[in-house]
Image (tube, grey):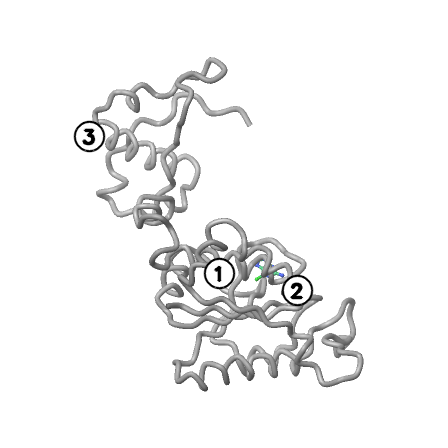
């Protein structure tokens, strides 16, 4: 069973998200272990200060190395005490390696994962040097803190754990699992505001439905994500299932 630890200044935010929905239910059912740690609890100064001005000047504050280091020492000691292998330590920073489903699958196979959330203008580089196995970014945009990134990583890793989703097919046919975008989905009613469900889906012809969905997956990927399309193996990309006739209005 995988264990994830999140080191953060905003434990409430992390607990709230991890207690909701599918992940929350799986957590209550002990399908994995997840702990949040308040970095401020590991300060040793009277004011419980965790940040300070940047050397060399500049605006904003920098998260100090020591509270993070002491927090990580505590987490690593817990693993050691239980005789568990050292967990992978990942710092969430916008300068990290871009996160993707391949990384999610890699992390999902590990027994332990520690996600460290920065805040303010950054984290003292020395604690990253001393503790980080890797730095992860969730995309080319800037967040106010690492929490939303850590929660995204935790969610994407936890949903791959046995028993978290109702069935493994839940993720095996989906976007990015095989480098393709998902085919479009429809539910009742059959006609909604003059828009009908594609007739093939009502045909009951399983092979035709499979073929239609595969074609949709490929054509959508080509139209929306040429970067992913070019990376597809030729046997997946090759049957250029007809391009959409009309572009959707934006
Ligand atoms: Cl990991 N942190 C912050 N602050 N911003 C980000 C990010 C992480 N990934 C993308 N933007």
Residue 18: image location, x then y, percent: 53, 57
Q: Which residue is identified by label 2? A: 10
Q: Earlier in the sequence, mark 1 or mark 3?
A: 1
Residue at the (77%, 67%) spot, across then down:
60
Residue 238: image location, x then y, percent: 24, 38
Residue 246: image location, x then y, percent: 43, 21
Q: Which residue is identified by label 3? A: 207
Count of labels shown?
Answer: 3
SS at mark 2 in the image: loop
Are circles 1 and 3 on residues that touch, CB within 8 Å? no
Q: Earlier in the sequence, mark 1 or mark 2?
A: 2
Cα gap from disc 2 to disc 3, whole angstroms: 50 Å
Report which quarter residue 17 is drawn in.
bottom right
Q: Can you tell which mark lies on residue 32?
A: none
Mark 3 burial class by Cα count in 10 Å: few <14, some 14-19, many 20+:
few
Q: As displayed, is residue 187 above or below residue 136?
A: above
Q: Earlier in the sequence, mark 2 or mark 3?
A: 2
Residue at the (38%, 20%) spot, across then down:
197
Q: Nearer the viewer, mark 2 or mark 3?
A: 2
Mark 2 burial class by Cα count in 10 Å: few <14, some 14-19, many 20+:
some
Cα gap from disc 1 to disc 3, whole angstroms: 36 Å
Q: As drawn, which residue projects farthest toward the front?
A: 29
Report which quarter residue 205 is drawn in.
top left
Residue at the (58%, 62%) spot, across then down:
94
Q: Within 8 Å: ligand 1 and the Cβ of disc 1?
A: no
Cα gap from disc 1 to disc 2, whole angstroms: 15 Å
Q: Which residue is identified by label 1? A: 154
Quarter of the image containing the N terminus? bottom left
Quarter of the image containing the C terminus? top right
């Amino acid at each position: 069973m995988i264990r994830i630890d999140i080191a953060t200044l905003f434990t409430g935010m992390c607990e709230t998200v991890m207690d909701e929905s599918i992940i929350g239910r799986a957590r209550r059912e002990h399908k994995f272990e997840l702990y949040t740690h308040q970095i401020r609890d590991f300060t040793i100064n009277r004011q419980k200060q965790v940040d300070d001005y940047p050397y060399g000047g500049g605006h904003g504050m920098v998260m100090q190395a020591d509270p993070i280091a002491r927090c990580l020492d505590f987490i690593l000691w817990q693993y050691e005490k239980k005789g568990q292998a050292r967990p992978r330590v990942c710092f969430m920073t916008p300068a990290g390696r871009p996160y993707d489903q391949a990384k999610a699958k890699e992390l999902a196979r590990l027994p332990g994962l520690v996600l460290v959330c920065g805040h303010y203008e950054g984290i003292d580089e020395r604690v990253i040097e001393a503790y980080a196995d890797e730095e992860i970014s969730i995309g080319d945009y800037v967040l106010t803190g690492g929490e939303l990134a850590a929660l995204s990583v935790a969610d994407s890793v936890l949903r791959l754990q046995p028993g978290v989703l109702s069935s493994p097919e839940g993720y095996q046919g989906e976007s990015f699992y095989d480098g393709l975008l998902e085919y479009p989905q429809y539910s009742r009613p059959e006609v909604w505001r003059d828009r009908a469900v594609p007739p093939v889906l009502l045909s009951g012809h399983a092979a035709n439905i499979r073929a239609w969905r595969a074609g949709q997956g490929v054509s959508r990927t080509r139209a929306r994500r040429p970067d992913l399309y070019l990376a597809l193996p030729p046997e997946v990309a090759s049957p250029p299932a007809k391009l959409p006739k009309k572009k959707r209005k934006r």
